[in-house]
């Protein structure tokens, strides 16, 4: 017993050491892509945020409350530092690799520790481990394997306590990621492999509660994907025929990446399903034929069929029969097979162990061990290399484009990043590539217009704003941006019309109210300008440009009122301007002049003193003063 415990400890230490070494580059990496959607947002960080996470679907990116509770706790521990999140993800992966080996030992599968090491070091897992958002994979797999171990214990002693423990761990797995709903079906396949048959009373009936729980959470997640995340629309309008073709292709794609993990791409090319040929059917037909052959082979060994069923069954939720948001840009992703790959890895390790044992000589056994060590070293080196592409978001997008130059999403996101960083010309190139690859991408058309306008190409920008509106007539941002471009070209009436169009599309669009207000102010229509700027500030109090402009507009309105002899109304406008911006020297002087005419000499003197004080701090001349 002591020897067994020492072997278990040695195996676990070896896996943890190997994982830490292979994933060492990750610890220097930052947040990438949508990590900030998962790391707890400010409004969810208080204690009350836990209630939002659990009881308000839509409060988080996906309704995985156990996952987001973990992120909530992590934020309390290390805040916005990515190191803690990365380190925990690495540890969770190492823990899952150890549990995987323990499950195989429990099932008496040969090569259990080798399987654990392969899973620990395989680069197909790098996406799940190096990408913080995919903590949903590493966390859910840990609970999945713990639930499997507990159920295997229950299968041995029929302990009600073990059954309840398994159910509870399964619930934690589901609420971390719903793809784990396949566990009860996987356990039935395992029992069939071990026993050659299934008993309703012994095997199926005790698992009904797990099936019901898994189905309920799975269906709820599918609904959330459609209703909240947006997994619907033309990109998902696939008929059953095309969904079957996607599934057939995906199974072989994932299997191929397991045995030849190169190239691994964060965003693979999306398969074109517009034209179907006879070759399109090769993948699904080959999959069906393989299952039939394995079924015929079952009397000699049930293991290959069981592994195939486990692999395809665990992949089933992401094979294309259900909508997944990622299908917008690709039907496959490495992280989709993080859990499914366990079955194939276990089979490969068992086959290696059988081959090693069959080599009766010591030299043959040593050669087999050296070959296994070489494979593990290669896998670890590939994983180390993969981690580098997750260093930061720009590195990730450039890595995608180096292997998949037609990734419209990588071009678009890199264009946004470059434009925000002031690299306008390079951003324009990536936006142009985006609309070339996806001519329906209205957001890229709008952002291309913005980048062109930033570089002084206003006339060219207009055509892209118009194209964006043609693609999406209710696109308020494009209407607003088109108004700004038209104003810059001196087309005043058309610009005002576009601002008003944007506000018809979105009456709470603060920027459009601001732009309309500035335009009206430039035309001398001060009261209308003040009303528009008032609305912008009311919608977005933390809108510094609008607040500053509103202060200036109220000052100008005060000047107009002063000139027409409406002194009390002028005073009110000057006071409101100073409430918005107390540092307006000219407004203090204007207010002083109005107060003097009203006979409030002491108050006028105070305003003049304040103006002098501000002048001393910033000796620039006032821009506009009323005559005194």
Image (cartoon, grey):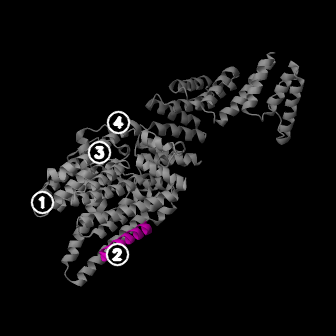
The numbered disc on residue 298 is: 1
Q: Earlier in the sequence, mark 3 or mark 2?
A: 2
Q: Is residue 27 above or below residue 320?
A: below
Quarter of the view holding residue 255: bottom left
Taking the image as shown, residue 517 lies to the left or right of residue 130, namely right
Q: Which residue is at the front of the view, 18 or 417?
A: 18
The tag on residue 234 is 4
- Among numbered discs 4 and 1, the one appearing first in the sequence: 4
Label 1 vs label 3: CA separation?
31 Å
Q: What residue appears at the point 62 percent right and 29 percent down from the top-left corner?
A: 538
The label nearer to you, 1 versus 3, is 3
Q: CA distance from mark 3 to mark 4?
A: 31 Å
- Identify the magenta region: 1-22
Which residue is the site of mark 2? 6
Q: CA distance from mark 4 to mark 1?
A: 42 Å
| Quadrant of the frame with the N terminus | bottom left
Lower position in the chain sequence, tag 2 or tag 1: 2
Q: Is residue 218 above or below residue 19?
A: above
């Amino acid at each position: 017993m002591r020897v067994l415990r020492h072997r278990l400890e040695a195996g676990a230490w070896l896996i943890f050491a190997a994982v830490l070494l292979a994933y060492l580059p990750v610890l220097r990496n930052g947040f990438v892509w949508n990590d900030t959607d998962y790391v707890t947002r400010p409004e969810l960080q208080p204690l009350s945020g836990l209630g939002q996470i659990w009881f308000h679907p839509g409060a988080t990116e996906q309704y995985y409350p156990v996952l987001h509770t973990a992120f909530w706790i992590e934020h309390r521990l290390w805040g916005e530092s990515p190191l803690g999140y990365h380190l925990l993800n690495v540890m969770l992966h190492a823990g899952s690799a150890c549990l995987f080996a323990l499950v195989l030992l429990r099932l008496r599968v040969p090569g259990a520790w080798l399987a654990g090491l392969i899973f620990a070091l395989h680069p197909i897992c790098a996406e799940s481990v190096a990408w913080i958002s995919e903590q949903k994979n590493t966390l859910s797999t840990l609970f999945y394997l713990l639930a499997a171990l507990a159920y295997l214990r229950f299968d041995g002693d029929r302990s009600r306590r073990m059954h309840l423990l398994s159910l509870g761990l399964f619930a934690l797995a589901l609420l971390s990621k719903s793809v784990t709903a396949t566990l009860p079906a996987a356990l039935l396949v395992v029992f069939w492999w071990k026993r050659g048959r299934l008993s309703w009373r012994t095997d199926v009936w005790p698992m009904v509660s797990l099936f019901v729980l898994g189905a309920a959470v799975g269906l709820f997640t599918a609904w959330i994907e459609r209703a909240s995340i947006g997994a619907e629309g033309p990109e998902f309008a696939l008929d059953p025929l095309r969904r079957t073709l996607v599934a057939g292709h995906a199974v072989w794609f994932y299997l191929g990446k397991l045995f030849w993990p190169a190239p691994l791409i964060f965003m693979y090319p999306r398969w074109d399903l517009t034209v179907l040929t006879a070759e399109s059917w090769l993948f699904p037909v080959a999959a069906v034929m393989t299952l039939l052959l394995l079924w015929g082979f079952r009397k000699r060994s049930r293991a290959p069929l069981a592994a195939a069923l486990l692999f395809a069954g665990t992949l089933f939720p992401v094979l294309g029969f259900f909508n997944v948001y990622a299908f917008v840009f690709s039907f496959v992703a490495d992280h989709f097979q993080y859990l499914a790959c366990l079955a194939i890895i276990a089979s490969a390790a068992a086959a290696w162990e059988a081959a090693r044992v069959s080599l009766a000589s010591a030299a043959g056994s040593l050669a087999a061990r050296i070959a296994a060590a070489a494979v593990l070293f290669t896998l670890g080196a590939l994983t180390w290399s993969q981690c580098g592409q997750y260093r930061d978001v720009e590195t990730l997008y450039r890595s995608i484009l180096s292997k998949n130059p037609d990734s419209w999403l990588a071009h678009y996101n890199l264009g946004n990043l470059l434009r925000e960083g002031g690299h306008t010309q390079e951003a324009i190139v990536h936006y142009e590539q985006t609309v070339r690859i996806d001519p329906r991408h209205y957001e890229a058309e709008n952002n291309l217009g913005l980048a062109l306008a930033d570089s002084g190409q206003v006339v060219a920008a207009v055509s892209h704003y118009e194209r964006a509106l043609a693609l999406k007539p209710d696109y308020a941002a494009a209407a607003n941006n088109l108004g700004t471009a038209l104003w810059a070209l001196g087309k005043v009436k058309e610009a005002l019309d576009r601002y008003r169009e944007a506000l018809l599309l979105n009456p709470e669009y603060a920027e459009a109210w601001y732009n309309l207000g500035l335009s009206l102010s430039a035309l001398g229509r001060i009261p209308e300008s003040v009303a528009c700027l008032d609305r912008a500030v009311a919608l977005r109090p933390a809108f510094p440009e609008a607040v500053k402009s509103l202060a200036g507009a109220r000052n100008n309105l005060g000047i107009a009122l002063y000139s027409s002899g409406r002194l009390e109304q002028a005073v009110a406008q000057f006071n409101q301007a100073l409430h918005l911006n107390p540092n307006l020297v000219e407004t203090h002087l204007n207010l002083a002049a109005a107060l003097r005419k009203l006979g409030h000499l002491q108050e006028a003197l105070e305003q003049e003193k304040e103006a002098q004080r501000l002048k001393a701090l910033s000796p620039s001349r006032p821009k506009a003063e009323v005559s005194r």
